[in-house]
Image (tube, rainbow, N blue to C red):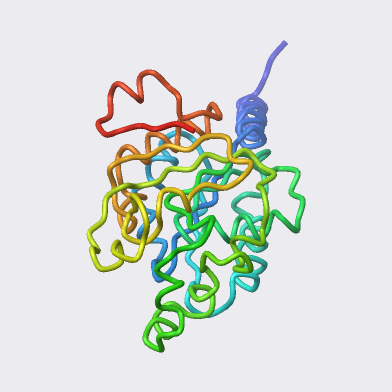
């Protein structure tokens, strides 16, 4: 039997497309959400590391100072889940810094997403921030932090407190170092300059780990990135090689 060159070329192209298609169908996506008054640039190190691990990464830039948690959550996370970039992924994880974690909690308390995978939060004000309690009525604070920032207090009727337990697989990375001693004076116990360790916790979380990092830079830390990748892959921070290869205290709850 004789085959011409065009037939062989077409066959090779079809096989290659089938292989690439099957790989895309099995891909996992990660949505990155930055914190209040930050931008997607703050999550660039995390984005690069996750992309190297084979994840399809969507690093979202959103106007965190312009709207309430409800409005930001519905518009930003809804749009991310509909992104063409994630259309072929069979699972979508979330990695969120600070306010980004509250957006995730708000959205998935109200919506079901069959592709939702694991969630890692970095320095989240899950029980609110005492800094907001002290400064929310101060006009410069409201101007700088916008509507969402003023919603993050610790009182029983604050938005984070009303969200209730999480219903997804959640790992939390908290910091215990501060470069803002004025803020830290307002916060009881160990803190990262914005949120106390206790306030980062939430009912229903799977694991909680503490590292020696500050709130503004925790998302850039090598430990945070390594721990995030481990949790997304295995559902646990408790990897022996991660614990032995990185410095800093590790407290698991």
Nearest to the observer: residue 42 or residue 205:
205
Percent from the top left, x then y, of residue 148? 53, 74
Nearest to the observer: residue 129 or residue 91:
129
Residue located at (43% from left, 22% from top): 239
Find residue 68 and report its image quarter: bottom right
Percent from the top left, x then y, of residue 199? 48, 53
Residue located at (32% from left, 49% from top): 220
**Relative to 246, 18 lies left or right:** right
Extreme residue in the top direction: 1
Considering only vertical position in the picture, is 44 above or below 29? below
Extreme residue in the front direction: 188
Find residue 185 and report its image quarter: bottom left
Percent from the top left, x then y, of residue 207? 52, 34
Nearest to the observer: residue 173 or residue 225:
173
**Relative to 172, 218 lies left or right:** left
Q: Which quadrant would the N terminus be assigned to in this image? A: top right
Residue located at (45% from left, 84% from top): 137
**Relative to 123, 167 lies left or right:** right
Nearest to the observer: residue 186 or residue 216:
186
Considering only vertical position in the picture, is 186 above or below 252? below
Considering only vertical position in the picture, is 35 above or below 220? below
């Amino acid at each position: 039997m004789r085959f011409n060159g065009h037939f062989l070329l077409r066959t090779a192209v079809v096989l290659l497309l089938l292989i690439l298609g099957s790989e895309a169908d099995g891909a996992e996506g990660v949505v990155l959400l930055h914190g209040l008054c930050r931008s997607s640039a703050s999550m660039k190190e995390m984005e690069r590391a996750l992309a190297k691990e084979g994840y399809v990464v969507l690093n979202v830039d959103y106007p965190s100072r312009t709207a309430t948690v409800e409005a930001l959550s519905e518009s930003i996370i809804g749009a991310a889940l509909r992104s063409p970039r994630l259309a072929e992924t069979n699972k979508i994880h979330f990695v969120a810094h600070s306010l980004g974690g509250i957006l995730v909690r708000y959205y998935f308390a109200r919506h079901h997403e069959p592709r939702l995978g694991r969630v890692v939060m970095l320095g989240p004000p899950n029980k609110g921030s005492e800094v907001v309690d002290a400064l929310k009525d101060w006009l410069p604070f409201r101007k700088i932090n916008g509507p969402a920032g003023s919603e993050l207090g610790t009182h029983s009727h604050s938005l984070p407190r009303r969200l209730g337990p999480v219903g997804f697989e959640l790992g939390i990375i908290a910091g215990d170092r501060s470069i803002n001693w004025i803020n830290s004076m307002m916060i009881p116990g160990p803190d990262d300059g914005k949120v106390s360790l206790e306030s980062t916790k939430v009912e229903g979380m799977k694991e909680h780990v503490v590292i020696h990092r500050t709130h503004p830079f925790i998302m850039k830390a090598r430990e945070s990135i390594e721990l995030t990748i481990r949790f997304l892959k295995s559902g646990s921070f408790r990897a022996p090689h991660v614990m032995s290869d990185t410095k800093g205290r590790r407290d698991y709850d």
